[in-house]
Image (cartoon, grey):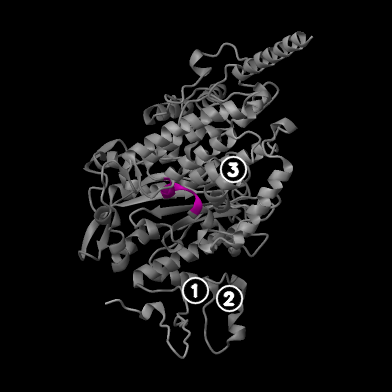
Amino acid sequence: MSGTILFVNSLYFSDAQRGMTYRYYYRYNPERISACPLTVHALLHIADSIAIAGPVWAYWAFPMERYCGKLLPAIKSRRFPYSNLSNRISDIALIRALELVYDLDLSYKIKRPLAKKTFSTPECEFLPSRELSFD
Amino acid sequence: VHDHLSDATFERFPLAFPSISLPSVRQARRRLENLAGFKTVLYDCCPNSCMCYSGPHNILDHCLYCKEPRRNEAGKPRQTFKYTPFIPRLRAAHANKSRAQLMRYRAHEHHHTPGRMTDIFDSTSYCDLLNSKVTVDGKELPFCFFSDTRDIALGLSTDRFAPFKKRKQTTWPIILFNYNLPPDIRIHSGNIIDLGTMPGPKKPKDADSYLFPAVQELMQLEQGVTAFDTLSESLFVMRAYLIHVFGDIPAMSMLMRMKGHNGTCPCRMCDIIGIRAPGDKTLYVPLDRRNLGIDGTPAEHIRYDPTALPLRTHTKFMQQARQVQNSATDAEEKRLSKAFGIKGVPLLSTLSALTFPTSFPYDFMHLIWENLIPNLVLLWTGQFKGFGSEADRQLTKPVWEAIGEACGSSSRTIPSAFGAPMHNMATEKHQFSADNWSFWTLYLAPSLLHRRFQNDRYHHHFVELVHLLNICLQFEISDEEIETVRAGMINWVEDYERYNFICQLTLFF
């Protein structure tokens, strides 16, 4: 009796295994093709890009996206957003050129003296790190 | 300008401060232009932003694409494109002592060591340029690229930008990067050279017409313009070359006049043919398509060898582009452009420092942080389109929620210097920026996902990717490391196809 069960079990397993191996080698399922967009293929070109064009940070889009983010507040009008944008772009360009031509700093940053973060106890006094010297 | 003051507010200033006399906005702009020494140029363009009436199109009265008239009844242009010339700005940069000093980085401060990649000046394309002569209009000029230490290397970038939240309308700002500056300040907003923005509301059909003034200036710069060098206190011939053009895939397809990522021949680097699943319209590009039931395709199109992809070369690209451009009939043009994935000769090809397609490298940020990793997450959580079944899910819902929770609460203990604060991955994924994705992938995910997958194989596979990405992001990459990335990526993509593109039963392995 046990022999038969064993036999049945082995038959079952070998069948299942055969099924799995068959499916394993039949790996490429047309229904799942959408998992292969161009972006996965493009990975194959990354090494070439680095060798030919340089390190990835030199030509990635982070600065471009940040630039776009900075442009966004320039839009004041729902009707003429593009003139808002182009006016701002040209104004900025002109001001930057002015800075270069006349060697100005037009950023209008208020320069505050750095607050000294010190605390002292009766026994000792802590100096801010800038004032420490090691010579 | 700094505080985003509107023109109307500026005009109202005299009401608030009657004691000081302020010029009107118009006068202020004119004065700025006089002081800076150059003017912005207005070009008319199509109200649907198909094309710009620049250069050879200046004689037209109607848009070539949508047939809309150029001017309104009063004879005024219906839409304009404001272009800010950049030659005067480069001149000013050379005339400014501190800036000129900084711009010496390319020739004087960067030292090229063979076998080490630290900046674009170590790349093969740049090194090749150093030894080749400049050619303008087919004529070879008697000097090599970057022969003067003051020659400027430029990079151009453009991107889709939606002014409103609905993201229906788009505008495409064009900016230049000055690669002569040291890398740490190169991308500071003060050092970006903005040229203008192709106005919306739609994607331009003829982006080249908007680039025309810029290309005109770049061609002038290839031949040289006189400028004053403040360091040597002498006049010299200033030259600048555009060596890189970059942006996401749609932006680059637009500038390269290619069909784009949904075309039959979608990749801009190689000739791989896209393929569609039965009953599906979109084309995909797996390497191995043996079981897709396609008959009559040549053997090399059935299984692509990732080590020897049919790469596009400059000569072949240009030849194909010309073939499309010169085709006799519309049908012929359609057929050819479909086969090549190229719509015509791009205007940028007139610039001699650019090589198609290698000067248009794939943008890492969009490719990895905004596409690949989010897609992987969708695949793991069973949310990828068409992959909804329970058996596909490598991360079950409770597991994924726990990971999201851990991820969201991690921001309290991570110093802000590492990047933007993290959100809950499971509930606030839409808020993830590229920065978030990058930090999550490189630092959080390898440990968060450890032993969380149904099948540990997926974790190994992911960690392998993280390892390769880490190499790509190093500040200094050696030749051997580039080879590691090459071999690693090939392995990774093949495994990816095997794991994700497979029958569900393999999940039991």
Q: Earlier in the sequence, mark 2 or mark 3?
A: 2
Residue at x 39% of width, y 40% of height:
A50
Residue at the far right in the pictured view: A1
Which is in the foreground here, disc 2 or disc 1?
Answer: 2
Is disc 2 surrounded by few (<14), some (14 to 19) or many (20+) residues within 10 Å? some
As helix, strand or loop, the secondary structure at mark 3 comes to loop
Label for residue B450?
Answer: 3
Q: CA distance from mark 2 to mark 3?
A: 58 Å
Q: Earlier in the sequence, mark 3 or mark 1?
A: 1
As helix, strand or loop, the secondary structure at mark 2 comes to helix
Q: State which quarter of the image contains the C terminus of chain A.
A: bottom left
Residue B317: x and y, percent? 42, 29
Q: Label 1 near label 2: C-beta < 8 Å?
A: yes
- Is residue B4 within the magenta segment? no
Whether residue B355 is visible:
no
- Range shown magenta: A56-62
Say which residue label 2 marks.
Answer: B10
Say which residue label 1 marks.
Answer: B28
Circles 2 and 1 on the same subunit: yes
Q: Chain of mark 2?
A: B
User: Label 3 is placed on what type of residue?
Assistant: His
